[in-house]
Image: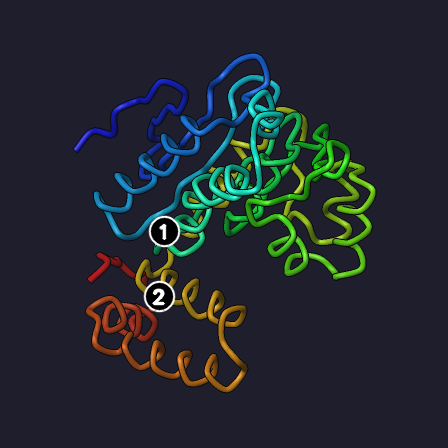
Amino acid sequence: MMIQNKQYVKHHKVGDIDIVTVDRPPVNALSEIIDQELKQTFVELCEQNLYGVIILTGAGNTFMAGADITRFPSLDSDGGASLARIAKEGLDYIENSSKVVIAAINGVALGGGCEWALACDIRVIDESTIIGLPEVSIGVLPGVGGTQRLARQVAVGKAKELIFTGDPVKANEAYRIGLVERVAAKGEAVSESIKLAERILKRGPIAVAKSKESINNSVSMTADEGFKAETRLFGELFDTADQKEGAAAFFEKRKPVFKGV
């Protein structure tokens, strides 16, 4: 099934890797339409194949800018909360999907753009990029998961510093504090992400998906619940053909051929 391009969200493939690009010049400012198109695209990709790797990036010199704030003056508390809930649906979806999602962060990733990156599994940032959550500068907070995900990604005190000041950080500082996992040369965030995706695709896809589920459980469960869930997921893998293939390939000293079953 071909994934149709949307008004602002485009899709193409590089080998077996799906590339999802936000394309709303000049700065890829987020909106309800883009949030909905992103979620729809990710749902279509996951329905097409449970396993695999998706790279999320932005067209031009911006990953994603924050939300289009032109509506903000007319919103009350209910309207603001509704706006955040709708926007958050797509982020929650990719975070909990069985696919690996890599953010290839280019140019600028502020506000909602940073929040989308935080919802991804791995972040690869262009060395020229700045990233941050400046929402307090306009009298709101990062309301699409930013306060929660940033505090789980970096030290709590650092998350508070970044959010309370609203100051963005450069790529190397983002890497130093653990906000991103890799720094790519200028203009190479997508290509570096593709290299990483190719390595992941060589591994057992069901094992990768269950690893993601188990790691996510460490946030949503108590330690005891997480250990029990890990044991269950580990056991489930022994009922897959991929596990048998992986073991056979190891003993036969050859590369495994995983099929996601």
Q: Which residue is mark 1?
A: 99
In the shown orientation, is residue 137 left or right of residue 181?
right
Pick out the residue farthest to the left.
1
Q: Name the disc covering residue 207, or none.
A: 2
Q: CA distance from mark 1 to mark 2?
A: 11 Å
Pick out the residue farthest to the top.
26
In the shown orientation, is residue 228 left or right of residue 147?
left
Amino acid at dot 1: Lys
Is residue 63 shown above or below 119? Answer: above
- Nearest-to-viewer mark from 1 and 2: 1
Which of marks 2 and 1 precedes in the sequence? Answer: 1
| Residue at (45% x, 53% y) in the render | 95
Disc 1 element:
loop
Residue 79 lies, in percent from the top left, at 51, 37
Is residue 130 shown above or below 177? Answer: above
Residue 203 lies, in percent from the top left, at 37, 58
